[in-house]
Image (cartoon, rainbow, N blue to C red):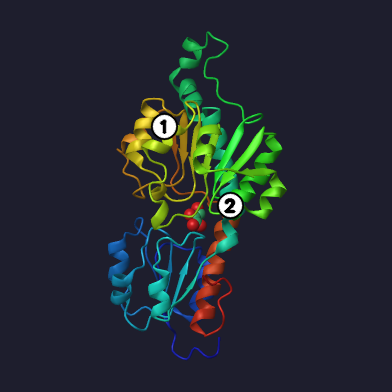
Amino acid sequence: MSNLNIKPKVLVSHQWPPEILLRLKEHCQVKVLGSDSFTTQEEFLKALPGADAVIIIPSITIDNKVLDIAGPQLKVIATASAGLGHIDLNECRRRGIKVGYVADTVTKAVAEMTISLMLAMARRLDEAMQSVKTGAWGTEWGSALWMCGKQVSGSVIGIVGLGRIGLATAKRLSAFEPSRILYCGNSVKPEAAKVKADFVSFNELLETSDFVIATCSVHARNQKLFNAEAFARMKKDSVFINVTRGALVDQDALYDALSTHKIGAAGLDVTTPEPLPADHKLLTLKNCLITPHLASGTIETRMAMCSLAVDNILAGLTDKPLPCPC
Ligand SMILES: O=C(O)C(=O)CO
């Protein structure tokens, strides 16, 4: 990177693998946040003025105000995510700031997490482990149906948004021999034929599916798509999985649906806010499992995401095309 005479300043919002940071440090002055705890938006904003490039994750919001705080020298933003709802892309474009993301790097890991949550809730893994820990295994196991769950084989699986992650999930779930895979979204997808998935309306998907899996991207028009009306349409023993963004769900309505058994269970990798307060009411429910936005959290995938984010920064700072532009 010989055309970088003065090392540009790069702000990294969270701790990054040291070996990947080393590559960045060869060419840039790097400030890394988050050594003590999860970086808040306020901490990020404090460190932001004067940065030429930033690397962020979805908990950091980039909007008009944030860009003003950064200053006019800001040239590149790299988000280590496939989702882009936290960045005002139009405003970045207007200001000539390049934005890179990590698109397909997350697909396989997120599909695996989706299926992990689905199976965990279908087979009540957390409740089952609690029964061992509390000794209920010894005192309650009297019925052949004790602690029984739902079978994926023979079930109807509904996928809301058959994009890269939805398709990868459907492909893997086909091996479980569901009776049908349904999907809904803006349009029929030719690639659905590969997984024999049928296009239906959102309402038909809710009413027919045993497993309702949200993998769609979240934008202004589908915030709280999963509200009281949606949960009321779902089957009483259905399992709801969300691996996209918490904003897709009305969490009060979800709490009501789960606590009054309007639906069977939920597995969420995303919530509003993130991190979710440890005393949140959803965490009191036996039929709700929440993981801390970990869907892309395999070593292989996180290394690939971090590496591609750094590639995007280095290319953007030297006026080369970003390897993965938005
Ligand atoms: O890549 C993203 O946007 C994710 O949220 C992965 O979990």
Q: Nearer the viewer, residue 226 or 38?
A: 226
Q: Quarter-wise, where is residue 322 in the image?
A: bottom right
Badge 1 is on which residue? 232
In the displayed structure, would residue 205 be above or below residue 247? Answer: above
Q: Position of residue 158 (x, y in %)?
A: 57, 39
Residue located 58% across and 52% down the image:
165
Q: Secondary structure at mark 1?
A: helix
| Foreground tag (1 vs 2) | 1
Residue located 43% across and 83% down the image:
8
* View extreme (top): residue: 142
N-terminal of the two: label 1 or label 2? 2
Q: Position of residue 102 (x, y in %)?
A: 54, 64
In the displayed structure, would residue 92 be above or below residue 166? Answer: below
Badge 2 is on which residue? 165
Q: Position of residue 70 (x, y in %)?
A: 32, 76
Report the side of 113 relative to 289 (left or right): right
Amino acid carrying label 1: it is: Ala
